[in-house]
């Protein structure tokens, strides 16, 4: 049955595709790009959508099994229904817009993850550590695989064999090549960079290669604090992130249709009580370079990857090239963090707060002897305890259909038996 132009619900989902988020008009022929347009009779449109939905649902599902189409979506930028939701259509009466999405794939956008290493250079408030984030991220893509078109990992040829387990299922590709070769990016809509501290400075070159390969949506390796906060932007630990942000902003002005997303989540909860922060859960001691009343934002690693993958499916703000996704699982002071440790483990901690200037001296000593790893390690030691790892309000948690794990729950899960 050839429906020609027809009203369709854009399907996304996990195990079983659910009908949610947006409504659209699909054609086999490409449609002109429409970034934003007000509709005159909103109530009438919604009424027609409700009627047509019941009439053509079966035909829609049959059509969606075939090759991907170009879609104009009517979407609600202030309401998001999680992929697990049952067949629902939500349209905002006060913000009804037209938004053009060129998927060119069978389902959703095609996504390329820049491969990770097994042992990160360092960990901490920046969280841009591909070794810790990469595997959970790919596992989350596998859970939400039905929502995407092509999903792949770009890996250095010498490390491609480490992804053999990923390739077994056949649902995620492994591309062997250089992060700086534009040909490796061809055929993808979205790129997620998992650059660690050692490769963070290469991100501007990665962005250039991705754009040359046709990518129009880039996620830099953020996954941490809001570096735009006062006193954070100039901090050594975030120097390469700042350079990457500046480069993204420049390319967004230069390249039509290019956009980028910054995912801000604070510190991984899984590391909040770790050696990098000066916490020893075995000896029950804390030696923190900072202050007891310093606030820190944390999010569990499993929630970070869930937010990341789900955020790709959110409509991008019309007329904007830069988007922030601001989420967190908890926000608390270091005094409160230590109290949670004591409660979960049932012991009293020996706590010592040290002047952050002492860490700054060690950082400078490492820099002078050319020890970049040591320089970053000492720069990172002061991040959490001095209040530099925060994601202030407003948050975007309510755009996702799940509640994040609180820090107490994370500690109970990780410290069971300690």
Image (cartoon, helix red, strand yellow):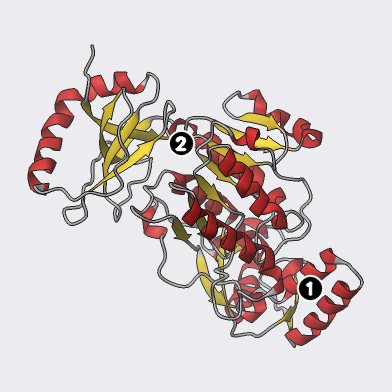
Quadrant of the drawing holding the C terminus: bottom right
Q: Which of 72 and 403 lies nearest the eye of the viewer?
A: 72
x 17%, y 31%: residue: 53
Q: Which residue carries the number 2 mark?
A: 109
Quadrant of the drawing holding the N terminus: top left
Res 378 label: 1
In the image, taking residue 357 as reference, residue 262 lies left or right, namely left
In the figure, residue 284 lies in which quadrant? bottom right
Mark earlier in primary sequence (2, 1): 2
Residue 382, relative to residue 50: is it above or below?
Answer: below
In the image, taking residue 247 as reference, residue 30 lies left or right, namely left
Q: CA distance from mark 2 to mark 1?
A: 39 Å
x 43%, y 55%: residue: 321
Q: Percent from the top left, x then y, of residue 254?
A: 50, 53
Q: Is residue 145 visible?
A: yes
x 39%, y 29%: residue: 16
Q: Percent from the top left, x then y, of residue 235?
A: 67, 75
Q: Which of 117 and 221 lies nearest the eye of the viewer?
A: 221
């Amino acid at each position: 049955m050839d429906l020609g132009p027809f009203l369709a619900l854009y399907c996304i989902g996990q195990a079983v595709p659910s009908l949610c988020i947006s409504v659209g008009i699909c054609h086999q022929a490409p449609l002109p790009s429409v970034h934003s347009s007000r509709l005159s009779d909103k109530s009438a449109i919604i009424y027609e959508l409700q009627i047509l939905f019941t009439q053509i649902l079966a035909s829609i599902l049959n059509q969606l099994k075939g090759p991907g189409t170009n879609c104009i979506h009517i979407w609600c930028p202030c309401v998001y229904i999680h992929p697990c939701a049952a067949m629902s259509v939500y349209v905002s009466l006060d913000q009804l817009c037209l938004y053009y999405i060129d998927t060119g794939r069978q389902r959703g956008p095609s996504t390329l993850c820049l491969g990770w290493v097994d042992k990160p250079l360092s960990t901490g408030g920046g969280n841009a550590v591909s070794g810790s984030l990469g595997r959970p991220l790919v596992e989350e893509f596998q859970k939400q695989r039905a929502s995407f078109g092509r999903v792949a990992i770009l890996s250095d040829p010498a490390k491609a064999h480490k992804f053999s387990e990923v390739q077994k299922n056949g649902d995620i590709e492994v591309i062997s090549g250089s992060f700086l070769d534009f040909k490796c990016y061809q055929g993808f809509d979205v790129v997620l960079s998992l650059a660690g501290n050692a490769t963070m400075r290469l991100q501007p070159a990665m962005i250039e290669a991705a754009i040359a390969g046709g990518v129009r949506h880039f996620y830099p390796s953020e996954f941490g604090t809001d570096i735009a906060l006062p006193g954070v932007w100039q901090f050594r630990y975030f120097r390469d992130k700042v350079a990457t942000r500046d480069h993204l902003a420049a390319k967004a002005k230069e390249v039509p249709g290019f956009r980028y997303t910054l995912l801000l989540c604070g510190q991984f909860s899984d590391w909040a009580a770790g050696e990098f922060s000066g916490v020893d859960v075995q000896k029950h001691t804390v030696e923190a370079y900072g202050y007891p009343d310093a606030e820190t934002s944390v999010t569990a690693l499993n929630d970070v990857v869930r937010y990341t993958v789900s955020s790709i499916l959110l409509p991008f703000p019309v007329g904007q090239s830069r988007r922030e996704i601001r989420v967190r699982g908890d926000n608390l002071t270091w005094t409160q963090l230590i109290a949670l440790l004591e409660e979960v483990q049932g012991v009293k901690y020996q706590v010592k707060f040290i002047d952050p200037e002492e860490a700054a001296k060690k950082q400078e000593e490492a820099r002078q002897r050319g020890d970049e790893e040591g320089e970053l390690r000492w720069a990172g030691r002061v991040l959490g305890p001095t209040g530099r790892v925060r994601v202030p309000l407003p948050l975007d948690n309510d755009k996702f259909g799940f509640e994040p794990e609180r820090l107490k729950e994370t500690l109970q899960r990780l410290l069971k038996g300690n």
